[in-house]
Image (cartoon, rainbow, N blue to C red):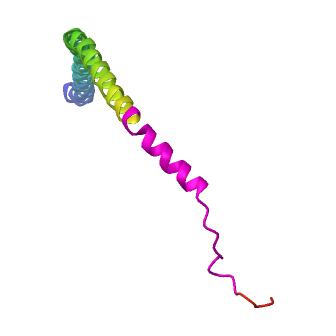
């Protein structure tokens, strides 16, 4: 009787130990899933932090470049007025020189034009054939 119970008890013990092993594996799998989920969440958090940090750096750089541009603009705005005055003066000087040259050579040019227009020398065109009936 004892032997019979022992043989019956052995499969029960084996089933219980198998069930306990399966339970241990299920718990280990749950723990591994938690670890993987934590790693994913950490990665997502790091990506969000990196994006936020990059956006902040971009905004800081944008602000810095805008400040540099405005500083450059204010430094050269005064020189722009100076350049405008210089160019205006140079233009006025050149216009004065052109006006003087015009006044100086005006009479000579008018005389040449009138002489060319009033002096007519009739001549046949080089392609005209004299005495040829076409």
Q: Nearer the viewer, residue 90 or 2?
A: 90
Horizontally, is 114 left or right of 49 in the view? right
Identity of the residue furthest to the bottom in this view: 132
Q: Give residue 1's quadrant in the image.
A: top left
Would residue 79 be visible to someone looking at this image?
yes
Q: Give residue 103's quadrant in the image.
A: top left
* Quarter of the image that includes the C terminus: bottom right
Residue 98, image x, y percentages: 36, 32
The part of the chain drawn in magenta is: 103-129
Q: Nearer the viewer, residue 121 or 50?
A: 121
Residue at 66% in and 76% down = 124
Residue at 40% in and 35% down = 102
Residue at 28% in and 19% down = 89
Q: Is residue 104 magenta?
A: yes
Horizontally, is 3 left or right of 98 in the view? left
Q: Nearer the viewer, residue 16 or 22?
A: 22
Residue 18, image x, y percentages: 25, 28
Residue 61, image x, y percentages: 21, 15
Q: Is residue 127 magenta?
A: yes
Relative to 1, residue 124 above or below? below
Q: Nearer the viewer, residue 127 or 39?
A: 127
Q: Give residue 44's quadrant in the image.
A: top left
Residue at 19% in and 11% down = 75
Would residue 37 be visible to someone looking at this image?
no
């Amino acid at each position: 009787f004892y032997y019979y119970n022992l043989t019956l008890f052995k499969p029960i013990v084996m089933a219980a130990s198998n069930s306990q092993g399966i339970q241990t594996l299920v718990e280990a799998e749950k723990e591994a899933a938690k670890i993987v989920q934590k790693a994913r969440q950490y990665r997502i958090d790091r990506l969000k932090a990196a994006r936020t940090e990059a956006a902040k750096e971009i905004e800081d750089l944008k602000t810095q470049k805008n400040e540099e541009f405005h500083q450059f603009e204010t430094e050269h705005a005064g020189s722009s007025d100076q350049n405008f005055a210089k160019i205006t003066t140079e233009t006025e000087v050149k216009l004065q020189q052109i006006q003087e040259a015009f006044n100086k050579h005006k009479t000579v040019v008018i005389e040449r034009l009138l002489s060319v227009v009033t002096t007519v020398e009739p001549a046949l065109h080089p392609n005209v054939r004299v005495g040829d009936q076409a």
